Amino acid sequence: MLQIYNTLTKEKAPFTPLEEGKIKMYVCGITVYDLCHIGHARVMVCFDVITRYMRARGWDVDYVRNITDVDDKIIKRAAENGETVDQLTERMIAAMHEDEDRLSVLRPDQEPRATAHIGDIVDMVQTLIDKGFAYAASNGDVYYRVEKFETYGRLTNKNVDELRSGARVEVEDAKESPLDFVLWKAAKEGEVSWDSPWGKGRPGWHIECSAMSKCCLGNTFDIHGGGPDLPFPHHENEIAQSEAANGVKYVNTWMHAGPVRVNSEKMSKSLGNFFTIRDVLEKYNAEVVRYFLSSVHYRSYIDYSEDSLKEARSALERFYQALRGVELNDAALENDFDERFFAAMDDDFNTPKAMAVLFELVTELNIASREGSEDAGKLAAQLKRLAGILGLLQQEPDAFLKGEDKEGELGSAEIETLIEQRAQAKKDRNFAEADRIRDELAEQGVILKDSREGTTWFREG
């Protein structure tokens, strides 16, 4: 049985969906004011692997991931760029989709945008006002009364009294309590806005997800996920809003991906160690990046470094070298690799343990290939199928190992010509020349592999 760690209960527990055979999952998406960074990629890949696995297990997954397309940062950036909010967000959404496609991240089933749900947001805010959980303030904003929601803070073990004592009190604050958070922001001059019972304005950040998740999945759903920075205050506020408005439990299981560190330091623009997905993909093969992001348990922090990416590349090379030249055979093979792989993933999506099973499978495949066993094709097919659940090993081996020709590097045609010259030199017993060519290619990062069938090659790193 699948066991999932629930951030709310702080323990792993057997997972049972609300509706048999169907899983409703909502993951907080991107605020689209800039290009996605490697931390976004971590969350994207984590929940893509989780979705793929639950589907491989036979569940029908309705995966919703929202887009925040109106926000202070978006308005500020659009003004700085001299473009409209719509122009900025459309451009950033297109860029996000390009990044996802390169990382083999499947699109969510529903991708609601905040600006398309203004009516749902206004309705929920009005419900909270009617129930006494929210109020329109003198400055035109609408706020949520945190202290009226008795269980506020249970997701992150926050105590309301401690929060109140540590809260900053603004001299001209229109809020009843410094803990109260905004549901609807009154429009400032020149800002994008919508009509509401409280005047022109736009939604606060937290209310967007409460309204969109309800619209897409209903009042209560199975899984809510997000990044490491979201439990407080964002998800804490979502719970307060949704349960106060709807009168029922909001989410059964809360899941959060771990943070990305860069050379063991927190990723930050101020530290100069901030990387967009595009920065990373300029240097590394997209599948190498995906493997790296999947190789650490989703709840653990992951350390982005040159060495980590090199290790990921070496691991994938080992997989693809094992698959190279093997004709796949989908016939069933009696072994325990499937059972152990699924057992690892059933343990709170333990990808490191699942990958260890794949490495053992590669060892068996290499032995079968050396012995000329007919099991080699069956093991290769099994390896591709199981790795495919993680979104890996879906390229042709040569396509990965040889890579794309890049400016300033030897092209594939030049490499093939040098290999032919080396073969002729060996035929002429000019072994010094053959070694020279091999060493010249090695200096260019091209590794040769000789066998009875001839010479194959791949690019290192």
Image (cartoon, helix red, strand yellow):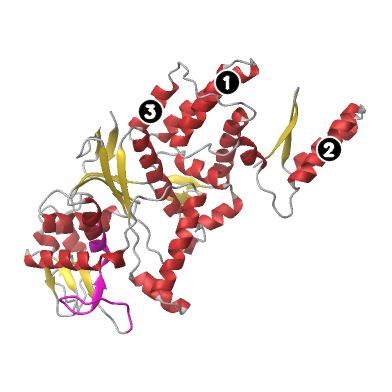
Q: Residue 376's mark? A: 1
Q: Point out the tag, 3 or 1, that comes first from the N-terminus.
A: 3
Q: Residue 291's spot in the image, x, y percent?
A: 50, 41
Q: Is residue 288 visible?
A: yes
Of circles 3 and 1, the one toward us is: 1
Q: Residue furthest bottom?
A: 189
Q: Residue 53's spot in the image, x, y percent?
A: 37, 36
Quadrant where the C terminus lies? top right
Q: Point out the tag, 2 or 3, that comes first from the N-terminus.
A: 3
Mark 1: which amino acid? Ala
Of circles 1 and 2, the one toward us is: 1
Mark 3: which amino acid? Phe
Return the residue at label 3. Answer: 342
Q: Point out the tag, 1 or 2, that comes first from the N-terminus.
A: 1
| Horizontal side, residue 389 vs residue 202: left or right | right
- Verify CB contact (< 8 Å) between mark 1 and mark 2: no
Q: Residue 158's spot in the image, x, y percent?
A: 20, 53
Disc 3 secondary structure class: helix
Location of residue 51 by image quarter: top left
Residue at x 46%, y 67% (from the top left corner): 91
Instruction: Count residues near mark 1 (Cα–Cα under 10 Å), then give few for <14, some for 14-19, many for 20+.
Output: many
Residue at x 38%, y 70% (from the top left corner): 74
Q: Which residues are magenta?
A: 190-209
Mark 2: which amino acid? Ile
Q: Residue 437's mark? A: 2
Q: Kindly report the distance in space between the C-alpha atoms of the residues bearing marks 3 and 1.
A: 22 Å
Instruction: Count residues near mark 3 (Cα–Cα under 10 Å), then give few for <14, some for 14-19, many for 20+.
Output: many
| Horizontal side, residue 31 vs residue 373: left or right | left
